[in-house]
Amino acid sequence: MNLDAQHPLATGLTADSRLIRAYQGTRPDATPVWFMRQAGRSLPEYRSLRVGTRMLDACLDPEMASEITLQPVRRHNVDAGILFSDIVIPLKLVGVDVEIVAGTGPVLGTAVRTAKDVAQLIELDPAVLDETLAPITAAVARTVAELGSTPLIGFAGAPFTLAAYLVEGGPSKDHIHARTLMHADPDAWAALMDWTAEVTGRFLRAQVLAGASAAQLFDSWAGALSLADYTRFVAPASTAAIAHVRDLTYDEGAAGTDVAHTDADDADAASVRRNVPVVHFGVGTGELLKEMHAVGADVVGVDYRVPLDEANRRLGGLVPVQGNVDPALLAAPWPVLEAHVLDVLERGRTAPSHVLNLGHGVPPMTDPNVLTRLVAFVHEVTAVFADATGSVPEAPVSAPSAS
Ligand code: CP3
């Protein structure tokens, strides 16, 4: 389905941004940068705005969610905003009893452990999201109106990561109950994953339709899985979740063609149909990179454990990558961080394109000035990667053969 003509990708406002170009596999004039959890506790302006408002209530207040989304963009000059929300928001909106406990994470009223629990859960109709998602789409619309040519990234949790919270009842180290359920009762597991894919897929699609220019699926806890379990019990649901945005397209070069061309064939020739870029990220998922790409992603997010040249090799040399500065080094002396970032950038050059990010979220105690300095540094040092005319190099510096 083609996006609305007013969507920032369709109007061309964000279509030529560094982020979207890099997600499409070309190298813009400088490497784009944004940070997972850039909105949040590392910013004093976030902490003061949040006083007296619960996390999920803040997400459901369009004015507050929009303001929190914009705070890091104003401060750091990052190349994208990411909507201030949470992966459990669509669960809450369909009626699941879930709260976010500060310092802990999502906690469920009751865990979903048995086939009976799953049957009860999936009676909650995902179609209610058509109405209950209104605060989220309102937040997106407000935010993109302010962001202008800076793209907004919409996001959602992948079915496994959400199911891990549902089955465990809260955060867990090894997700043992979820991993047991998939083997002990594959039918109940499949029903749970189908339902979760529908709920989270609708959440993601609504953000893109409302104005987000890219979509990121977070499978934060998929690193707990073996490759065999991922492929059999998880990948089909991740494919289904991504399918909710996979069909969304826009015509580039179409805007203004009515004015520039009188000949209809000319106008057609000038425009290229593109899909909304989809990013897929996991933590500890070095063994799953290829499969995480295969579920329908354009870009793969890499945590800090696998160097980007190795990640690129595992991905066959053909996939744009995002990552993977170790968040722990944000608190190290600047020369140590600088050397690490240069190494990440150098390894990232082996891939078709690279969006610099952290290997996981910004730690709450991070000095925000370090993030601002890092953005300026990455833009400055990578400007020389592009040639003197600023045009995009033809091919990756080296494209190792597929593994
Ligand atoms: O990146 C951004 O700036 C956008 C905002 C964002 C939040 N959560 C806000 C948030 C995003 C993209 C998420 C996604 C999310 N939520 C994930 C996937 C990404 C990842 O980190 O792996 C996961 C696993 C969750 C679940 C969740 N929500 C956790 C683990 C926590 C942290 C608990 C804690 O307090 O340490 C939350 C709460 C949360 N989500 C906060 C923020 C800013 C902290 C809330 C607060 O300020 O108290």
Image (cartoon, rainbow, N blue to C red):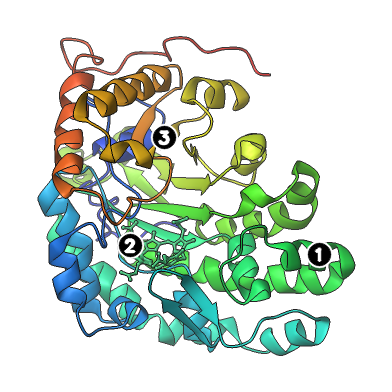
**Place of residue 385 in the rendered image (x, y in percent of width and height, measured from the top left):** 26, 15
Q: Are marks 1 and 3 in contact (CB under 8 Å)?
A: no
Q: Which of pointers 1 and 3 lies earlier in the amino acid sequence?
A: 1
Q: Which of pointers 3 and 2 lies earlier in the amino acid sequence?
A: 2
Residue at 31% x, 62% y is: 83
Q: Which of pointers 2 and 1 lies earlier in the amino acid sequence?
A: 2
Q: Nearer the viewer, mark 3 or mark 2?
A: 3
Q: Which residue is mark 3?
A: 324
Q: Looking at the image, in which quadrant does ligand 1 appear?
A: bottom left
Residue at 58% x, 43% y is: 284
Split into 4 quadrants, where in the image is the C terminus? Answer: top right
To which quarter of the image does residue 42 belong? Answer: bottom left
Badge 2: residue crowd in 10 Å (few <14, some 14–19, many ≥20): some
Q: Which residue is mark 2?
A: 4
Q: Which residue is mark 1?
A: 180
Secondary structure of the residue carrying numbered label 3: strand
Relative to 149, 26 lies left or right: right
In the picture shown, does residue 178 fall above or below 60? above
Q: Compute the Cα span from label 1 to label 3.
A: 31 Å
In the picture shown, does residue 370 fall above or below 309? below
Q: Are marks 3 and 2 in contact (CB under 8 Å)?
A: no
> Which amino acid type is shown beneath numbered disc 3?
Asn
